[in-house]
Amino acid sequence: MGKPEWFRNRGVASGTRIIEKILNLDGEGKLKIQSPVKRPPIPYARAWSIAFRTVHIVAISILVGGHAFGASADQLRPLLYGAIVSGAGMATIETYPSLQILHQGWGLLLLLKLALLCVVPFVWSYRLPILIAVMIIGSVGSHMPRKFRHYSLVYGAEHKE
């Protein structure tokens, strides 16, 4: 038995697989869902990613420790904002080439972490449990098996050539 047509007709553009799934819409034609084409890379993206990640780890570490040991809110807010900005910087670098990560497991966890960090200023009294949850989500997301990190809500299991 041969492979389905959408699998056989996949192509490669700019180093990124293009996978099409064809869905029938009650005889009204076909809807094609196509993964976005990869854009040109950001200059020095790897260096920017390392810089953002380093700032992020330092900010989150001091932030959580500060909250755990009762540092004042005035001392910790800049670290919170640093964690938010560095997290957004990492997200921008990761999503720029292809927005595909936004529907993959690790991209969804990234968005969840960023959303939780953005909630902290509004529920300040729950900050420590939220920050610990963010660290747990980050740790699990960074070390979970590839099949879960790259699982797509749109395309399903990771596609292998």
Image: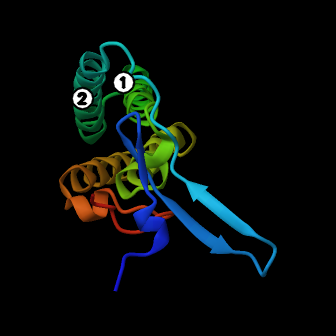
Residue 38: image quadrant is: top left
State the quadrant of the N terminus. Answer: bottom left
Element under disc 2: helix
x, y percentage for residue 99?
50, 41
Mark 2 crowd level (few <14, some 14–19, many ≥20, 10 Å Cα): some
Label 1's element?
helix
The residue under the point 48% across, 64% down is 153
Q: Is residue 135 above or below residue 94?
A: below
Q: Are marks 1 and 2 in contact (CB under 8 Å)?
A: yes
Report the front residue among 67 and 13. Answer: 13
Residue most toward the front?
A: 2
In the rendering, at what x and y percent does residue 142 appear? 22, 49
In front here: 19 or 120? 19
| Residue 97, image x, y percentages | 43, 32
Q: From what the image shows, is residue 77 above or below residue 94? A: above
Task: Report the amino acid beneath label 2.
Answer: Ile
- Which residue is labeled 1 in the image? 79
Q: Position of residue 55 (x, y in %)?
A: 27, 21
Name the residue carrying label 2.
Answer: 62
